Amino acid sequence: MLTNANQLLERNLDVFEQKKLLVVNCPDDAGIEMLMQETSADITVIALDWRSFEVASKTCQQTFFSHQLPADCPSHDAILIYYPKSKQEFEYIFHMAAPVLQENADVYVVGDNKGGVKSAQKQLAGYCASIGKVDAARHCILYHGQLTEAVPEFRVEAWFKQYDVSIGERALQVYSLPGVFSHGELDIATRLLLEEQTDKPRGRVLDFGCGAGVITAWLASRNENATVEAIDVSALALASTEKTLNANEVDAKVYPSNGWSQVKGVFNGIYTNPPFHKGVKTDYNVTESFIRGCKAHLKSKGQLHLVANSFLKYPPIIEDTIGTCHIVAKNKGFQLYRASYFMR
C-alpha cells in the first residue's frame, strides 16, 4: 500500500520521465518500486531510515543507507525529497544533496500538510526559482522549483549540535544531527533513566533506539569491560552516536536494525527510551514488538530498563512477556520501568 505522499506522486509520474533522479528520505512503502516500474527515470536512492532502505533496495540497485552522499555519487538533473519530520532536517537533506545537483536541476518536494511540507517553499526560496505547487491531494502537496543559485559547500561536521550532559559525577559530550530525537539537549526521560542506574553495566548490554548516543556512551563509560551495542533505524542517529562515542573516547558496536531484525544473541541488560512515533505519526507497534522480543534476547536474570510516558500501556506487555514490572522512578509524566527475566 502506498503512503498518501506516494499516492499523490502516482498522479504526477510524468514529471520524472527521462530524469536522472535522486530520491532522498523515501518512506518504507512501494513508492520506489512504482517510480522504477512506471517511469523512465534513472534513480538513485539515499535512504535515511533502515526500513526504507530494506524496501527500496529490493527494486533499486542504486540504493544507499547513509546520512550523506556516497563519495562516487554521480550528478543528477532532478531531486525528489520526501519532507521529513522537522524543518532543520529538511535543511540538512537539501544541503547534503545539493553538491550532486546540476545547474537548473528540478527540485521536487512532497509531504504531508501536517508534517510541515508548506515550509519547503520558504526554505528553498534562496536557491530555487519559480517554486510552485504541482498538485495537492490526500492531505499532501507536491512542490517544484529549479535550482538557480549556488548552495554553500556541505560539511557534515558543521551540522552537528554539541551539548554537555552531567549525570552524578559523570560528564559526557553529546553530538546530534538534525532530525535526531532530542536534538541539542538531553530530554527528561533519558535523564531519569540514567540517574536511577546504580549498578554498573556488566557483560553484553544494548541501547535500543540509540538516538544521539547518550545512553550508549554512558553505559560504555561506566564499565570499559562491558560490551555495549547500539541500534537505531535512523542513519542520522547512528552517525550522531558514533560522533558522541568518539568525543568521549569510548567504544560500542553501532549498527542499524529494524527492531530486533539485525540483532543476534542475548544480553545482560537492555536499556531504552523507545520511540512511539514513525515520522510525524504516532506508532506504538515498534516498541510493543520490541518488548515482546526482549524475552528471546535476555539472559536469565537479565534486565530491561525502559523509560516512557506514563500514559503508554507498556507494563502489561512487560509483565506478560518478561516478568514483574517495577516502577523505579517517576518524573514529570515519565516512568522508569525495570523487569528481570527468569527462564522458566
Image (cartoon, helix red, strand yellow):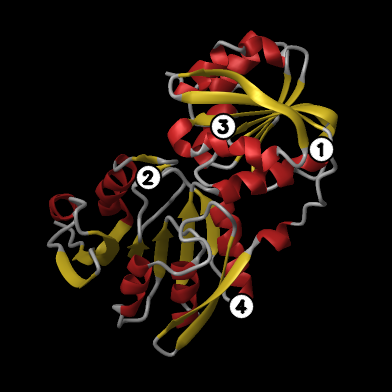
**The N terminus is located in which quarter?**
top left
Which quarter of the picture shows residue 45? top right
Q: Is residue 248 or residue 202 the one in the foreground? A: 248
Residue at 54% across / 25% down in the picture?
A: 141
In space, the residues marked 1 and 4 are separated at their CA atoms by 34 Å
Q: Local crowd at mark 1 within 10 Å, few (<14), some, or many (≥20)?
A: some
Looking at the image, which is closer to me, 121 or 90? Answer: 121
Q: Would residue 210 appear left or right of 56 to someone viewing this image? A: left
Q: Say which label, 2 or 4, has the lower sequence index.
A: 4
Return the residue at label 1: 100
Residue 249, numbered label: 4
Above or below for 162 versus 32: below
Callout 3: SS: loop
Q: Earlier in the sequence, mark 1 or mark 4?
A: 1
Q: Residue at x 12, y 62 (%)?
A: 324
Q: Residue furthest bottom?
A: 169
Q: Position of residue 163 (x, y in %)?
A: 55, 73
Label annotation for residue 277: 2
* Real-space Cα separation, disc 2 to disc 4, in angstroms: 31 Å
Crowd band around label 3 with a 10 angstrom C-alpha radius: few (<14), some (14–19), many (20+): many
Indicate the quadrant where residue 41 lies. top right
Q: Earlier in the sequence, mark 3 or mark 4?
A: 3
- Label 1 sits on a secondary structure element that is helix
> What residue would you read off at disc 3?
26
Mark 4 element type: loop
